Structures are given as structure tokens and as C-alpha cells.
Amino acid sequence: MKILLKNVNIVNPHQKLNEKNVDILLTDGIISKIGKLNKDDIKDAEVFDLSDKIVAPGFFDMHVHLREPGREDEETVITGCNAAANGGFTEIACLPNTEPAIDSAEVVEFIRKQGLNHLVDVHVIAAATLGRKGEIISPMAELHEAGAVGFSDDGVSIKTAGILKRALEYSKMFGLPIIEHCEDESLADGAMNEGINSTMLGLPPIPSIAEDLIVMRDIIVAEYTGGKMHIAHISTKKAVEMVREAKKKGLKVTSEATSHHFSLGDDAVKTYDTNTKINPPLRTKEDIEEVLKGLKDGTIDCIVSDHAPHALEEKEAEFEKAPNGIIGLETEIGLALSELYHKKILTLEELIEKMSINPRKILNLPVPVIAEGVEANFTILDLNEIWTVDLSRSKSKSKNSPYDKRLLTGRAVAAINNKQMFYRDKFINL
Amino acid sequence: MPLKSRHLLGLEGVPKEDIQLILDTATTFREVLERPIKKVPTLQGKTIVNLFYENSTRTRISFELAEKRLSADSVNFAVSSSSVSKGESFKDTIRNIEAMKVDMVVARHSAAGTPLFLTQICDANIINAGDGIHEHPTQALLDMYSIREKLRKLEGLKVCIVGDIAHSRVALSNIYGLRTMGAEISVCGPLTMIPRYIEDLGVKVIHNIDEAIQENDVLNVLRIQLERKAREYFPSIREYAKYFGITEERLEKNGKDILILHPGPINRGVELSSGVADGLNQIILQQVTNGVAVRMAVLYLLGTLK
């Protein structure tokens, strides 16, 4: 079928593309014409009037937990992909803290099969060590061949510097990154960030140095091995400063920040709402300021959701007992536009780099090109729509989010990929 | 004048007038406890559940006595004898208890924040009897009552809380309550047991026990919880007792009349020597008696709110 995306602005910094007020004609999901189109071109086309909307290369979230296999009651590959499309993403990468962990080619293939034919492409980040136990490195060559795009012990740091060194050396053969959750176990048996709030709330504290120490270790081992290191969900001032220094030295170190670590601080925990229990924990104002600075100066390469679905009954518990994490795929773009673009931390181009281009570069995946003859892989944004988060409309199987009823400015209005379009709550075959 | 809140979750933010009202009301009930028949009909027909998710003997008995002396019907719910051991969630347990039509819940739990959670899932008046390492408001109220009874005031007094501040719910409630009433608060203990940001609460940190004795009018000495993880925060009981224990020699050396409180149970020879625990400076057993009166006051004031 033919569809016409009318009066859009195309922005793709990867192609240095910035075209205002043009039409895009898609024929069976392929870009058949860009520009001002004449009547013959658009005959039989379904018209979408998208005045002032932005067409960008499809957004990519490289930190998503899909819970399948193991906890299909919380999320499946399909429901996670539905949430991703609803949130405006065309591709995601899922992390390996499943049951069993993604440490064999069979599990990688299983997940990829579950996501087949969906609008959203699922890329798999496999475990760096067997069972994520930090003892024996995973069969990375085989995992790579099965389609894994990176390795991580997700949820924990690779246990020892010795195993980390081995993992970085081995993964270097495939040019794939080691993605580290940075947390020193001996300092991390708490429920929230250590600060005046943890003291006043009587919640066991996690000091910021739990993250800093592992970031420091990881940078040192990355420098020594020359391996590719990606710091997941960076959240402390010191950690951002260390990654900035590492980048100045030219090391292969990259980092990501979650949308909650730049939009919520540890004051939010005062309600004991278990949807503010996240790991790494919500931090202080100074940490948030440094994360924003890191996003602005390029220390932080990507924005992610760390989408972590949990069953209602598990979150409806005593704060100290509740599991860590929140869902985020459907609020991430709104939060990034509200807190980063509208507050002039990032330009639109920089935001697209962090939510579309950089994740693919880190995982060695091709960046979608917007040109005639190419299959469409777009995220379409309305930068100015003011909307209220309504969790009851989430496509995720879980509803654990602290953002219900939050007013946001800007959202994704459509996602197009794999000859499908998600628009106004529906999938349309193109 | 009624209390501002229908729950007592902690002393953070509780206004001076409310604390004053509770302490004054407790004075009335303290007198009841001296009568031959120690019972008033004030809460007749009210049902109170003592929900204890954590072992406690004295706090539970103190609440239970307070409830009985106000003629309320009270039921004890202890974790070992409950459906929790059968895997029921906290929320389901509360919903079930509420369905039995209770008016007030006295809750003790090992996790901070559970009393607030209770107010969100149930309609009864909630009284926090200790939540994790957060607050234990009735303990602080009875401490304040006992200090006021002995020294006739709270305003301007210098009070030092001694021991494991980081793992104590008594410390935080004392800090909030006593500061509201105009006292000056310091804490003293090994640095591993002092929360890193405690000074932001307007509290002075002292590392030397002799200094603490010299500078203060009152010492509220906390129990070192030998049975808990807290044990890992200092090298040995011997070292703790030697450098932070209150002994007669120490009191004599500093030549100062000082009031000593302890929430009990005491580790004799650790935080207090036997001589001090039984000596003239301490009011430990008065605290226990006053505890019943203070809890009667809290139950009465909340239970009769319109």
C-alpha cells in the first residue's frame, strides 16, 4: 500500500539531513519519493497530515529487560516490543538477566524467534559469563554468530577484575562491547542512595562510591586491554567525571544514562513508593546536574529506559523487600524531550544522536538512512504536544512506573519499521 | 484541641503543640496507673490490633496494657503465629485484618515505611510501634515524658544519644521530637555507627564519651544490638565497652550529675555497667512505667478523634 507522510521535517544528523516541510511517499514500506509531490505521485495513497512533526531515523533503546524466558508473567518479547512501538522505538536491545540467562546460542535464537515479524527489531545482549556468575566467560564466538550484539553480566558487575580482563580481551575479537552494571557488591546492600534522605527515611543506604569504584576499575581494565567498554545507567557525579577523563584519553569507553536518572532525584523516595526503588538508586541534585552536563558535553552517549517490568504483587510490598526497577519504554522519549530538549540541554540533533544513532554505533549496527529506495525505519516526533502519562494505556505487561499522571511535553506519534507502522494505538501493515 | 493527624507514624514534622498535648495527656493517665483500679472506660467498644511483624516483648506488652487500661478490645497478631509464614503478602494480611472491622492498628515491622503503606491500604488509625531503622515515636515520647518529669523541662536541655545511631529507630524519633521541643541534640558512638549525613538534621557529632558526659544534661543510651548485623560495625564488645560504655568511674571522673535513660533491654557490662544501670542517675524503670501512660495518651487522643 501507499502512504503519504505530509508536511514533515526530516532530521537525520547521521546524514547531515535537515529538510523542512516535505512529503514522504512510502510504497509497501519502501521510501519511494521525498520532496514536494504532485498529484499523480500521491494517487491512491493514504494521507497522514503530519505538519511540524519530525521524521527521524528509528529510535533505539539499548537497555531493555524483556523477562522472557523465565518471567513471562511480567513481560514477554512481544509485549515488550508492543511497549517499545508505543513508546516510539523501532529497535531495542534486551539484557540477559532472564531465567535461564542468555548464555547460549539457543536462548539468543529463541528470543530472536519470539520477536520475528514484529515492527520492533530485538537485538540480544548476551551474558558475559556463564549464568552471569562471573566465573567462566560465556561462549562469545557462538553467541556472536547467533546474533548477540554485546555482552553483560547485567544486574551485577563482572565479579572480578581477572574475569573482566578476560571478557574484554575475548570480546575484542568481535568488536563487541562489554556492558557493565557498575556496583561494588560489598557496598551495595541497601535500598536507596546514601544521603540525608536515607537517614531521614531509615532506609539502608547505598553509597555513591559503590558505583564509582567499579567504574574506576572498569576504565583501568579497558585501558589495559584496549577492549570496548560501555558503562550502563551511569548515575553518579564521580562516575561521569571518570568517563569524561577516559574519553579525553581516547579510550574505547562509552556510557548511557536512563531517563529516570536525569528526571527524578532521591527526594522522590520520601513517599516510600516502591516505584522509586531502582538500581542504581535515584541520586542527589548534584549527581543529576553532572549527568545533564555529561549528556551535553558528550560524555554520555546514549539515553536508555532500563525498562524493568515487575509484577504488581512484588512491587506492592515493603520498600526494603520490593525488587528494583521500573518500566520506561513508553515515557522515555517524553521525558527526554521535556527535560533535555525543551530545557535546552540538548538540541534535537543531539537528542536523535543519543536515542537513535549512538546506540547502533556502540553495538556495530547500521544506522537507518532516510533516502529514496530504502526501507523506512522512522520515529516520528511531535515536539510540542503536551500530554499526561496514563499507565492504564501502557502496552507493557507490568505497570511499575513512578511517572503516572506526569505532564510531559513532546512524544513520539508514530514508529515505522519492517513494513509496519504504529500509529494512534494500532499496528498498520504497509 | 485535637491532634493534627489521625495517625502517629513518626515524630518528623509533628508540631510542638501536639507533642505537648500528648505529654500533658500522659500526665493524667500516669495518675490512673497509681490507682488501685487502673482502668478507665475511655476506649470501650474500640478494637485495636497489635500487628507485630518483628519480635518485641516490652513494646507489645506496654501497648497491650495501655489498651486494656483504656477498656479497648485488643488482639495480638504476631508474625510467627500468622499466615505470613504461609506466604501471604503484607497487603493481603492487612486487608484481611481490616475486613474484620478494626479501629486502630499498632504496627511493628522490620521494614521502614510500612506504617505509611498501612495508611494507604487500610482505614484504621495507624500507630507506628517501630519501623525498621526509621522511627519509634512512642519510645521517644516516653523518653521525653521521663526527662520532663525528672528535670521539669525539655527546652534548652542538652541531650546526647549514645550508641548505634545508624541502626536505631529510637535515635531518629528522639532527634525529631526533642529538637521540636527546643532541646539541643548530639550523638556519640563509633563513627561506623553514625549516619554520614546526621549533622544535616541539626545534630552535633561527638566521638569521645567523656566529652559527651561533660557537655550534656541527659544521656539516652541505646542498646547495642548484639544479635543483629550491627555487631559487625565495631571490632569487639570489649572495645566498645571500654571506649563507649558508661561506668561509675566514668561518671565520677567527669564529676557531673547527669540523667541516664535506656530504652531496654540493657546489655549489662556493654553500654552500661551494672552499677550505672542500677544507680542513682538512671530512670530506666520509670521509663517503662511512663511508657504505658504515654501509649494510653496516644491511643486515647487518636481513638477519640472525630
Image (spheres, rainbow, N blue to C red):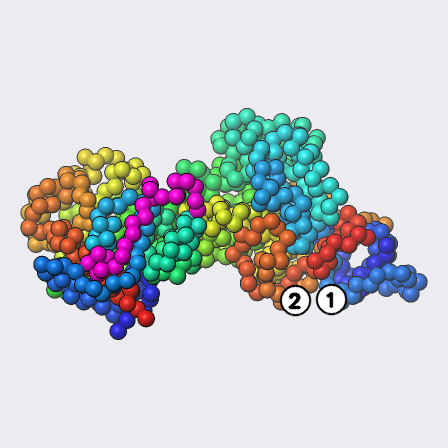
> Residue A140 appears at what percent x and percent y?
63, 29
Q: Is B183 rendered above or below residue A355?
A: below
Q: Is there a contact, CB below 8 Å, between mark 2 and mark 1? A: yes
Q: Quadrant location of residue B306?
A: bottom left
> Residue B73 appears at what percent x and percent y?
27, 57
Q: Quadrant of the N terminus of chain A?
A: bottom right
* Residue placed most toward the observer, B40 or A348: B40
Kindly tell me whether residue B62 is visible in this rendering.
Answer: yes
Q: Residues within 10 Å of mark 1 (few under 14, many from 20)?
A: some
Q: Residue at x 80, y 49 (%)?
A: A419
Q: Residue at x 22, y 60 (%)?
A: B71
Q: In which chain is the residue bearing label 1? A: A
Residue type for callout 1? Asp
* Drawn side of residue A126 relative to residue B184, left or right: right
Asked whether residue A348 is drawn in magenta, I would say no
Q: Identify the residue position indicated by label 2 in the image.
A: A384
Q: In which chain is the residue bearing label 2? A: A
Which range of residues does the magenta coloring cover? Answer: B67-89
* Residue placed most toward the observer, B152 or B210: B152
* Residue placed most toward the observer, B236 or B103: B103
Q: Identify the residue position indicated by label 1 in the image.
A: A52
Residue type for callout 2? Asn
> Residue A180 appears at what percent x and percent y?
55, 39
Q: Quadrant location of residue B200?
A: bottom left
Q: First in sequence: mark 2 or mark 1?
A: 1
Asked whether residue B85 is drawn in magenta, I would say yes
The CA span between labels 2 and 1 is 9 Å
